[in-house]
Image (cartoon, helix red, strand yellow):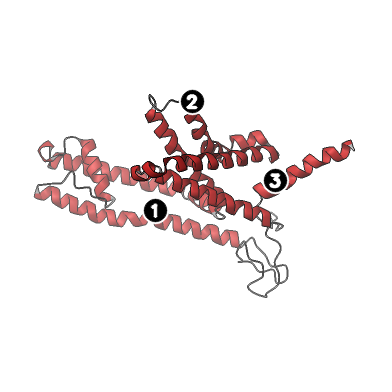
């Protein structure tokens, strides 16, 4: 009897773990879909709660829905701690911190009187936007994108360093050419103009007036269009390499050919059934 009582909590923990942390079971997919719907609905309530005309009509309903969503996310957070094999590790992880930030503002708001701490209350309400980061865990290819950015970080760093040098040069030139009388009161002000010009934003709050300054501005604008394509090309090339490397790991057991998508169920060459995505073993090349 005692052994059966001990096995029941372990079985419950395992079932909850499969449902909450797993994504390849029917119950797990339903749980994820319901959680996504709850997150999106809570964000819609947060956005509508910032519109004065809506607050005047449905202030009570907004608060009630917020408490409901907070209760749902609190239960989810506690269940994750309960069924996780390493609760402390989960609590300290990125997703654990985000899950905590999703529920913490509502509870903290109870400890601050609205009359004297209205600014803090507003800040705590806006902090609920962190719930949108919970959606990251449901992006199937997020790890692929992260690896792509990590792989191309040195190239991107070199690119941004080159851009920083260019905007400093153009900012200093405009400070010398235009001067304080035309709005370029300092080199940082000139660098600010160079940044908004080279990124093709162009607020128009600082505009060159002299012919030489306008010529430099035209050169900066043309350079901006050329520069914008560089980081896109870097990330696209690295993403293509990652996708090719990822596809090459999925081999067909019949024809031994690779190049399949990671979620493919059948071989695109011979039509044979591929291994279950959860049970695939990555081939390791012998040295």
Which residue corresponds to the image point at 50% horizontal and 34% vertical from the top-left?
106
Residue 231 image label: 1
Which residue corresponds to the image point at 41% horizontal and 33% vertical from the top-left?
123
Residue 17 image label: 3
**What's the distance in space between the residues labelled 1 and 3, CA to CA?**
40 Å
Q: Quadrant of the C terminus?
A: bottom right
Say which of 104 and 172 sits in front: 104
Residue wearing tag 2 = 111
Residues at marks 2 and 1 touching, judged by CB atoms closer than 8 Å: no
Tell me which corner region of the image, top left, top right, bottom left or bottom right, holds residue 251.
bottom right
For residue 168, side relative to residue 37 (left or right)? left
Task: Give percent across and percent down for residue 254.
Answer: 73, 71
- Image height of 245 relative to 161, above or below: below
Q: Secondary structure at mark 3?
A: helix
Count every numbered label the image shows and give the total: 3
Count residues near mark 3 (Cα–Cα under 10 Å), then give few for <14, some for 14-19, many for 20+. some
Residues at marks 1 and 3 touching, judged by CB atoms closer than 8 Å: no
Say which of 258 and 266 sits in front: 266
Q: Nearer the viewer, mark 2 or mark 1?
A: 2
* Residue located farthest toward the bottom when viewing the structure as drawn: 270
**What's the distance in space between the residues labelled 3 and 2, CA to CA?**
34 Å
Residues at marks 3 and 2 touching, judged by CB atoms closer than 8 Å: no
Q: Secondary structure at mark 1?
A: helix
Q: Quadrant of the N terminus?
A: top right
């Amino acid at each position: 009897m005692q052994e059966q009582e001990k096995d029941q909590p372990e079985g419950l923990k395992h079932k909850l773990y499969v449902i909450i942390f797993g994504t390849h079971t029917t119950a797990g997919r339903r749980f994820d879909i319901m959680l996504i719907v709850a997150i999106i609905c809570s964000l819609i309530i947060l956005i509508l709660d910032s519109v004065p005309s809506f607050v005047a009509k449905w202030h009570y309903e907004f608060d009630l829905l917020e408490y409901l969503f907070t209760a749902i996310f609190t239960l989810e957070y506690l269940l994750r701690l309960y069924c996780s094999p390493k609760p402390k590790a989960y609590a300290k992880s990125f997703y654990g911190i985000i899950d905590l930030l999703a529920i913490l503002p509502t509870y903290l708001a109870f400890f601050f009187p609205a009359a004297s701490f209205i600014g803090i209350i507003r800040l705590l309400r806006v902090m609920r936007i962190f719930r949108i980061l919970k959606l990251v865990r449901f992006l199937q290819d997020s790890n692929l994108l992260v690896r792509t950015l990590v792989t191309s970080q040195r190239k991107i760093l070199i690119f941004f360093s080159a851009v920083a040098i260019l905007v400093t040069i153009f900012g200093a030139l405009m400070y010398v050419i235009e001067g304080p009388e035309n709005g370029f009161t300092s080199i940082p002000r000139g660098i600010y103009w160079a940044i908004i010009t080279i990124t093709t934003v162009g607020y128009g709050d600082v505009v060159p007036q002299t012919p030489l300054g306008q010529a430099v501005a035209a050169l900066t604008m043309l350079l901006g269009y050329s520069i914008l394509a560089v980081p896109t090309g870097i990330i696209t090339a690295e993403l293509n390499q990652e996708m090719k490397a990822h596809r090459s790991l999925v081999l067909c057991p019949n024809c031994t050919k690779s190049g399949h998508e990671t979620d493919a169920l059948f071989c695109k060459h011979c039509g044979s059934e591929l291994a279950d995505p959860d049970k695939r073993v990555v081939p390791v090349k012998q040295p």
